[in-house]
Amino acid sequence: MTDEKISESATTATKSDKQHINMFSRGDLLFWKCEYEKAKKHFQMILISPPISLLDSARCYSSLGAVNTELKNYEEAIYNYHKQLDLLIKLKIPNKTEGDIAKCLMSIGMVYFLQLDYVQALSYQKQALDTLAIATPAHDLTSKIYRNIANLYAKTKEFDSALKYFQEALALNDRDLKDNGLTLGQIYADIGVMYYSKEDYKQALYYFTKAHATWLKSLRPGHLYIKSMEKTIRTVESKLINIPANAKWSQNGVTIAGGNGQLYYPHGLVVDDDQTVVIADTENNRIMQWKNGDTTNGQVVAGGKGAGNEFNQLNQPTDVLIDKETDSLIICDQGNQRVVRWSRRSGTTQGEMLIDNIRCWGLAMDEQRYLYVSDWKKSEVRRYQLGEKNGTLVAGGNGDGGELSQLNFPAYLFVDWQQNVYISDRNNHRVMKWDKGAKEGIVVAGGQGAGSAWTQLYHPKGLFVDTLGTLYVADQENHRVMRWTQGAKEGTVIVGENGRGAGANQFNYPFGLSFDRHGNLYVADWGNNRVQRFSIG
């Protein structure tokens, strides 16, 4: 088609729109009244009613596609949309028809989706996205296509790919749409569903909570979406480590790792959802993993090539965490003054640098995948976006000391869903809580000098905070694990305090501490070169 004819067609379309406005309105009304057969006949009549422009024809075929979709005449609907697509391509008015072409491709994709042909559906949705990339930005349509693609990946259980596109929609919303209502809440909810499907319940809870908060601002109280999300949140909370306030543990631990020469002064540890235990085997310069039920065959999953600073080596690692998003381990490589990441995929032979020139000791990650690192030399804690080198100071940084704005050898960390940071402040014999954005911390355990009274701690190390806000801490020099409820002035001993020793009810300097999702307690028993599990009663 020549440029003159395109221009003429567009002009004719303007006149035609005025002539046929009532006819289109009648067809649209029939559609919205669900009188689809009547609507279909009506739009077919418009097609054979002269004069009819290319734009009018394209609009009629689009309407017929929608009608046939509702009538479940899917092959006919696809034919109609392809006729619309051919006309729009012939017209091709710059910065005008690209959006219509993208909508048409998206509609074809949705019909294939209804036919359960997810491959074709995905192909057309991606073609729609590519078409919009060369057009004047249409952020609301782009966001919708991102979500369509994400939902298709979810249907095929490709949850990581689905998450990628939901996150794209969320970023677009935050950057360009600024929608604080229904759609934004739905995106948060969709991301929550993806994490739930991956059994990452902490992340799922974070996004479901965001969805709930968003809908509370934009919908009436008691709305079905709000009520439904509240039920979902309760379900997810039940999946998390939910330790009853009056819980008790077996006083005799069971050795589930080490104790046979395979560990040498273990420090931090983490327990995966399937009860796999991952341990910083410090003096062996490696990270070890023990599968649930196999207490004899530990597996080296990082390092193990002797102390050194090559990327296939570690040097006295003190802490480790699991990043489920990338299926990797993040390791405090303390002796090399760096934080590194090792993939958990089989065949991995070396790690990669995340942060260097840091005297790290403890690590934590929040639901938004910010990484928190304690620097024992600078007596501070910093938060990093993955890939960032300098980070943001979130606690301490005011020199060694015992003031509320100071730390003295911050060791292990825990971060709750509100991004509040808990720190075992080793040489101040206390645990500090720094609320997000605070300039000083709050003493939540100890702080009464070194000692063995229940109001005191003596070189606290590993710590954990449950959904009730109860703190659990490994009290190193007292050879015990203590529990401190919110606001309590003293703690209680849950295991240990039976003297230093190697018995099943004893510790020889407990370091790392973690729980599995059932509430069983795991302790890295440093001096006994073992990990003990204490079953919840």
Image (spheres, grey):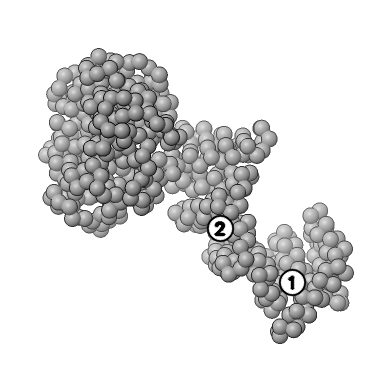
**From this viewpoint, is residue 101 visible?**
no
Secondary element at tag 2: helix
Which residue is located at x 64 percent, y 45 percent?
Answer: 182
Near-viewer residue (397 or 301): 397
Q: Is residue 213 left or right of residue 13?
A: left
**From this viewpoint, is residue 264 visible?**
yes
Which residue is located at x 34 percent, y 25 percent?
Answer: 404
Q: Which residue is mark 1?
A: 58
Q: Is residue 100 left or right of residue 35?
A: left
Looking at numbered disc 2 in the image, what kind of residue is underneath it? Answer: Tyr
Q: Which residue is mark 2?
A: 146
Crowd band around label 2 with a 10 angstrom C-alpha radius: few (<14), some (14–19), many (20+): many
Secondary element at tag 1: helix
Image quadrant where residue 466 sits: top left
Percent coordinates x, y for residue 100 in the rendering: 68, 67
Farthest-out residue, front: 398
Percent coordinates x, y for residue 498 in the rendering: 19, 18
Percent coordinates x, y for residue 337 in the rendering: 22, 46
